[in-house]
Every structure is written in C-alpha cells, then in structure tokens.
Image: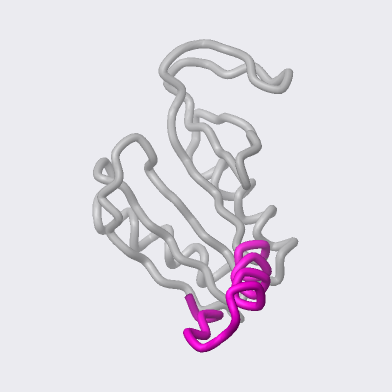
Amino acid sequence: MLELDAEAQEEDLTQSLMGAIDRVHTAMVTYAARDSEYDGQPIHAGEFLGLFDGSLLGSDKSLDSLMQIICDNIAQLDAEFISVYYGEDVSMEDGENTGKTMEDRFPGADVSVVNGGQPVYYYMISAE
C-alpha cells in the first residue's frame, strides 16, 4: 500500500503495485494432520510444516528448528520489514518470543508482532 499513488494512471499504478508484491515474501508454519509426502520430502503426522513463498521448506518435531530454517531463508532477502502474525493456537508470550528471535537474527529490520488470530497456521511471517 505504500506504493499507492491515487493520482497515477492505471497502467503505472498496476506496474508499481506488482513491483511491490514481488518484494514481499511469506513464510508460514502449520502442522501435518497425517503422514504424507510433498515434493519428495516425507512428512509425518503431528510435525510442524514450514512453507516459504508457497514451497515446502521442511517439517520438524521442533518448532525452534523449523524457525531457524525459516530465518535462514529470510536472511537471503536482506529484509527491511518483518511482520510476524501469530495464530489462535499461539500464546502472546510465544508470539512475542518469536518476534524477539527475529529481532535478534535481523537487527537491521523493523520487526512487528501481531496477534493475527488465524486458525491452522501458527505463524504467518512477511518479509519485505
């Protein structure tokens, strides 16, 4: 929305907003409801699943281990803004701790933590 210029021509505005979208990357953490396989990777019921820009990063019994993998992917972006939206099954304390992890790992980024209240996804993280 920072790219929005209400007085711009439609074509210029579309190009500007599409460019902004390309700079936003999303990581999500959910869980596996059953044993399965995705992109050749085995997934076991009850494990946490990490997704980054729609691709499976992996699954793990440890949320901390999976968050490190997500941070490794975010580190490749040189992100200026990181927003952590924690879901309905995450306590405020855990959400804030995840935000602190992001602040420690990315001291140059502006990190925001928001109670998103979303079902199914423990975390939705945007990096831009």
Q: Give the percent coordinates (x, y) of residue 30.
A: 44, 35
Q: Give the percent coordinates (x, y) of residue 87.
A: 31, 47
Residue occupying image coordinates x 45% and y 12%: 34
Residue occupying image coordinates x 51% and y 72%: 103
Q: How many labels does the image show?
A: 0
Q: Is residue 7 above or below residue 110?
A: below
Q: What segment is highlighted magenta in the picture?
A: 1-22
Residue occupying image coordinates x 25% and y 50%: 117
Image quarter for residue 121? Answer: top left
Q: How is the structure coloured here?
A: one colour
Q: Is residue 100 above or below residue 3?
A: above
Depth order, front residue of 70/125? 125
Residue occupying image coordinates x 47% and y 84%: 6
Q: Give the percent coordinates (x, y) of residue 96.
A: 34, 63
Q: Is residue 52 magenta?
A: no
Q: Give the percent coordinates (x, y) of residue 48.
A: 48, 32
Quadrant in which the C terminus is drawn:
bottom right
Depth order, front residue of 10/118? 10
Q: Is residue 80 left or right of residue 49?
A: right
Q: In this view, does 46 lie to the left or right of 107?
A: left
Depth order, front residue of 68/29? 29
Q: Is residue 17 magenta?
A: yes
Image quarter for residue 104? Answer: bottom right
Q: Is residue 113 above or below residue 16?
A: above
Q: In this view, does 121 lie above or below 41?
A: below
